[in-house]
Image: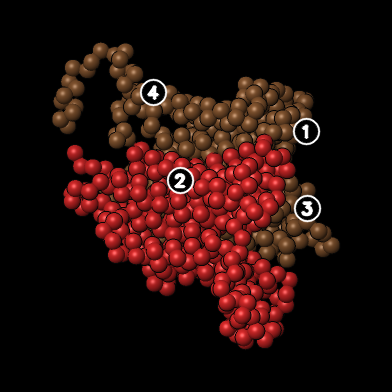
Amino acid sequence: MSATPTELPKWADVAVIPLINVAAAFVISGLVVTAIGEDPFNAVKLLIGGALGDLEGIGFTLYYATSFIFTGLAVAICFQAGLFNIGVDGQAYVAGLGAALVALHLGFLPGVLLAPACIVGAALFGAAFAAIPGYLQAKRDSHLVITTIMFNYIAAAMMGYLLVDVLRKQGQMNPETPGFPPGATMPQIKDLVAYLGWQWPDTPLNLSFVLALLCAYLMWLLIWRTRLGYEIRAVGANHVAAIYGGISPARITMITVLMSGALAGGLAVNVLLGEEHRLILQYTADFGFVGIAVALMGRGHPAGIVLAAILFGILYQGGAELAFDQPKITRDMIVLIQGLVVLFAGALEHMFRRPLALLLTRFQPPVPDAPAAERA
Amino acid sequence: MEAFDAFIVIFASGIRLAVPLIFACLAGLWSERSGIVDVGLEGKLLTGAFAAAAAATFTGSAWLGLCSGVTVTVLMSLIHGYASIDQRANQIVSGVAVNMVADGATALIGNAWWGQGGRTPQLPDSALFNSIQLPGAYTLHDTPIIGPIYERLISGHDLITYLAFLLAPATYWVLYKTRFGLRLRAVGENPAAVDTAGISVRGLRYGGVLICGVLVGFGGTYLSIAQAAYFQPHMSAGKGFIALAALVFAKWRPLPALATCLLFGFLDALSIRLQGTILPVIGSVPVQAIQALPYILTVILLAGFIGKAIPPKASGIPYVKER
């Protein structure tokens, strides 16, 4: 049994272990690329070049990263309370309905008000769809993991029905809503920097990126600088102790899951208000599940999540370019890498701790009071 | 008579759709009864289907396909087992990883090997598990009621289907009537007690995970080389999660699990059948409503409005031997 959490210096814990875990995921992915007869180093070169080689690549990378920051934060805030929300994808999907309904029915509002109203609509619908599993977890003790899995499929069925039979534009084949009015869109970064006289290529990168960074900062503030955040962490760390401390886990569970659903709505803001300007079938493209990988890789910390989201943005944008150049390496490669990241950074996160701890003690003088520590 | 015929058709297709659910559901039952939560059933079904179709494509043998399917799902199960039992990982995280790896790897490798967007070539009948005519099916052909029921519902399925139906009583027997079954259930409820009795918690849990891998391998094999004659990416299409729902709905008991899987398979067949038809009185039923029904029913059950679904007490909790 090698899983006893071994003591490591803080720098090793924060930086080295996550790096080793992610490296393991990439080494295995590299072996898979070799096995299907391609050169992994060339693949990495093409991937990085496609994602960061020019401003256009960077724009797309950050656009994807924006989506992953939102879904990553949505998963991570639940982690803080010891909850696992697998339903971010379904919540984001339904949040898209909220954004679309506001955009299509409150179109008379001036642009300054309409876009924020759409954002609120997305957040409210996302939160509302998370509310039922949240309530069932808080009050009826049903396992959030199972109910949110079920709700992903309920969302898919419900949205499929609405888009095919109810919301679809007259005489239109594709299951999608009519286009949003011009006011119901997020300003493009391209247009914003044009005011400053700078040139930025035509990419879907929009103001949602700034909103995502703001959400990350606010989440950090909430979790580590407010009373509510303390209560969330207390419930996550030990909910029996939290009850003893006068905290109601049911209340905290409900609040956390609602915030998680609202954050999932950020995906709708970035993709629908920022790029598509209409609601389309299965628009989430499983990005809600990428959030799980991002949250685990970022270790539930907003700063880590922003970094992990940018890495996944690089993978998604670079992966698209790579698939174009080398048709054998399809975008499924990215899903595989994502799975391996979840495996090594999540499930097997302690696997490399003991080897590393042993390695480190070799370079350190023996600690004199080691037996005392063992007695305790 | 027409209604009866339609009923036979829907029910027969329901049985076929239920088979992968039965395997995946009972697989999950073995794992979760031993204390290891498995949300990776979906991914394992998919890898099983891929490995079976790949081996059947290369060797032309359905049996080697089955062996390959089962071997690969057992390996996937052992990864999940290693993470959950030895590394004391979060079992949900590990299951999610299994699903993602399966989803990405099968499509990627399938595409690299055969092109065609990850789809295997169509397999010939000789590389598939074909339907078997039970004795007497032809003689009873003209008997009303019993004839069609015997000929089209009971006879005419493939070997794996019959195995699926035997599996539930077999699981029941092993779980409730043997020493191994008693210990396995105990380790899912109270591992410390099992440990105190000098029985290896780790060994029993690996046992549960191993059986889970074998069973889900049969389900995956069925998908690609019995129900269909090819593998294509994402072909498990959420069946692993429906099986998970069925497991909860059946409250982790083998015979109700069989019944629930049949019900969910029947609902699936019904939703396919009702696509675009207009029923008298009710009007047109949105197919999506029927498709969502298994999930909605399970949530209602989980909410405790109709009975209460209580999982094995120690499931999902890594066992730490006292020091």
Comes first in the chain, label 1 or label 4: 4
Q: Position of residue B223 (x, y in %)?
A: 59, 55
Few, some or many C-alpha atoms within 10 Å of disc 2 (few <14, some 14-19, many ≥20)?
A: many
**Circle 3 residue:** A179
Q: Nearer the viewer, mark 4 or mark 3?
A: 4
> What is the three-letter code of the residue carrying label 3?
Gly
**Circle 4 residue:** A12
**Circle 2 residue:** B74
Q: Which residue is nearer to you in this view: A115 or B46?
A: B46
Comes first in the chain, label 4 or label 3: 4
> What is the three-letter code of the residue carrying label 2?
Val
Q: How many marks?
A: 4
Q: Which residue is nearer to you in this view: A39 or B307?
A: A39
Colour that chain B carries in the picture: red
> What is the three-letter code of the residue carrying label 1?
Asp
Q: Secondary structure at mark 1?
A: loop
Q: Report, in whole angstroms, how far the alpha carbon at label 1 lies from the one at label 3.
A: 20 Å
Proximity of marks 1 and 3: CB atoms separated by less than 8 Å: no
Marks 4 and 2 belong to one chain: no
Q: Report, in whole angstroms, how far the alpha carbon at label 4 lies from the one at label 3.
A: 50 Å
Q: Nearer the viewer, mark 3 or mark 2?
A: 2
Q: Report, in whole angstroms, how far the alpha carbon at label 1 lies from the one at label 4.
A: 41 Å
**Circle 1 residue:** A202
The disc at residue B45 is none
